[in-house]
Amino acid sequence: MSIVKKANTTTRRSVLERQSPGAPAGLLALTLVSALPMLLFLGYSYWRQRTLDHVDPALYLILFVPIVLGYLLYRSQRRVLRQIASVAEAVEVAANGDAAAMELVVAEQDAGPGRAWNTIVKKYLSDVIADPALTVGSLGESGLYSMVVLNSLVHAVCGVDRSGRIVVANTSAANFLELDTNSVQGVLITSHLPEPALSAFEDVRQGRVQRRNSVDLVRHDESRNCEEILRLTVAPTREQEGICVVVTVEDVTRQRLAEHSRHEFLAQATHELRTPLTNIRLYVEEAIEAGDEDAKTRAEALNVISHESLRLERLVAELLDISELEAGARVMDKGDIRVDQLMEQLYADYLALAESKGLSLEFELPPKLPVLQGDRDKVAGALHNLLGNAIKYTPEGGRVTVRIDDDDGAIKFAIVDTGIGIGPEEQQRVYDKFFRSSDERVSAIEGTGLGLAFARQVAQMHGGDLSLESELDRGSTFTFSMPKPKLAA
């Protein structure tokens, strides 16, 4: 949405910004034109006689009097000359294209071409001056700059008088009201407000509410084909310049989405934390009741408590990792990442687990593996999550493959499985915190839904990304990419 009308903004600034405090210096040279013949005569005489003793002193008076008089005239007319230069520049700006009227106004004095020019431009200032009582001179440079600032705001802002007519409005307000910028002044705002906003406006205008009054509007954005939430605020004023109410409109769609995500995150986190805590409490009570008389029951209860404690510790650690990464509070411990050692560690950690599930675990590695730069612990944690998920969601008899591709400028870790796969409608949500697939086979497997969110943030923090290719009942491929370090020249 365009906020400020501009003409050739990449090559020029507004006239007011470019006006110099003095008149063009080239005009001062005109005072020397009348003295040029005398200077040529004196120069010729000196060249012929090698002296100026024979020159009549009256000639010096003839030489310097025009210079002095010209300079005094220049000093007295400097303000007028400056206005002439500004008007000439404004004409050039107007000829370059569709200039906003505010860009054509020049500084003016009590009399002179500046005021005459501004009088001509005045009738084009409907997007700057709303009240006919205001003149171009009374608006002044500060008023014009204030309007430029007002038009640069993303929020819609307009001032309304006691009768409900718009006195002044920025471009965003005109767009919100679906009015032309040059004809928005004097329009009844009540004719262009939806019902919830109209009630809020009338409450303030008629004095029933003596404070800010806000209402949220839901509107369909056809350009993006989505719903947007706009917050319209009506605030009373002290009725200066005829304005008694100021109406502002801001887009709060992102704020609402962020609030919804935060509430959803808290609800999911609470649910995930409650389960192990409940199990711990129940089995503590069972262990206490069993006492020394039933050692077997007590041992089983303590085993469950230990398992749930580890699960709780792992969940809290993942939550802290994700929160710190999102907040930017956790600094990367940059260093060398030896990929060969990292692959050996992954193979050793997951070979026994894969064999216990009857899976084939394969590593397809190039002969020479590079040394990357980054946080080794975070990268290792992300790859552990990806490989652990592949083994977890691959049925018995399947295959999990870790493959490294040395692409141009990047190293790609591909974790390929022949597992249950992910449906196309859920592939964009797998990176959401606490997201678990609706597939019944997934619900039977323990998980928090945080591993992929953490892995993607680690990849992006290192300048890479995490991508997914998957097909239901055919398997998934997660590709963790990292840029290779640049070689020194």
Image (tube, rainbow, N blue to C red):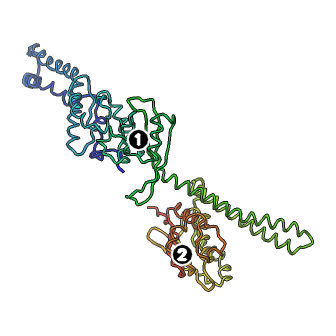
Q: Is residue 484 above or below residue 444?
A: above
307 or 377, nearer to the observer: 307
Residue drawn 21% across and 44% down?
A: 96
Q: Which mark is residue 422?
A: 2
Q: What residue type is disc 1 on?
A: Val
- The answer to whether 166 appears left or right of 461 in the picture is left
- The answer to whether 43 appears left or right of 152 in the picture is left
Residue drawn 11% across and 20% down?
A: 51
Residue drawn 44% across and 45% down?
A: 249
Residue 134 position within the rendered picture, expressed as x and y whole percent measured from the top left: 31, 29
Q: Counting other residues with Cα less than 10 Å from the Cα at mark 2, is it few (<14), some (14-19), or many (20 or more)?
A: many
Callout 2 secondary element: loop
171 or 16, nearer to the observer: 171
Q: What residue type is disc 2 on?
A: Ile
Q: Quadrant location of the C terminus?
A: bottom left
392 or 226, nearer to the observer: 226
Callout 1 secondary element: strand
36 or 182, nearer to the observer: 182
Q: Which residue is mark 1?
A: 157
Quarter occupied by residue 123: top left
CA–CA distance between discs 2 and 1? 47 Å
Task: From the image, state whether disc 2 or disc 1 is nearer to you.
Answer: 1
Q: Is residue 73 above or below residue 205?
A: above
Q: Residue furthest right?
A: 293
- The answer to whether 236 appears left or right of 315 in the picture is left
Q: Which mark is residue 130?
A: none
Residue 89 position within the rendered picture, expressed as x and y whole percent measured from the top left: 22, 36
